[in-house]
Image: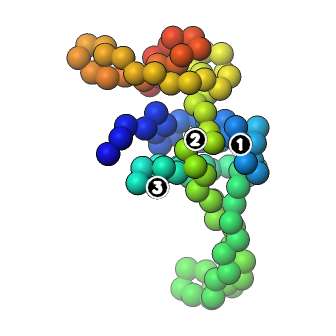
Amino acid sequence: MKKLNIKKGDTVKVIAGVSKGQEAKVKAVLPLEDRVILEGENVKRNSRHTRPNQQNQDGGIVKIDAPIHISNVMLIDPKSGEATRVGRKKEDGNSVRYSKKSGEVIK
């Protein structure tokens, strides 16, 4: 499996698609599908029609966060707050991610 530059908990900016320009936090990463699920009010959401059940007594139309392809999001630089590309380098024997724009290590 390939290494992805985006992890759960990162703040990203959507650079293409319906939610272009929005910033959101990564809720989940789906590496086999090359997709991420973002949490936020202004990002892409799908409508799901549900029947009444034990958890949702009313049923009806429920909005759920939709997966977005990983190539359509860019990581936010922790120093400048702008979208940046991500590189990897060895630091103390471990591979760490760093911002190509500012050179700062991303935690």
**Which circle's residue, 2 or 3, is located before the other in the chain?**
3
- Is the residue 44 above or below the residue 11 in the image? below
Closer to the camera, 67 or 34?
A: 34
Residue 12 locus on image (x, y percent): 61, 36
Q: Are marks 2 and 3 in contact (CB under 8 Å)?
A: no
Q: Are marks 1 and 2 in contact (CB under 8 Å)?
A: yes
- Is the residue 98 above or below the residue 52 in the image? above
Amino acid type, label 1: Ala
Q: State the residue position of label 3.
A: 33
28 with respect to 101 (left or right): left
Q: Give the secondary structure at mark 3.
A: loop
- Image quadrant where residue 22 sits: top right
Q: Residue at x 53, y 36 (%)?
A: 10
Closer to the camera, 77 or 15?
A: 15
Tag shown at residue 71: 2
9 with respect to 46 (left or right): left
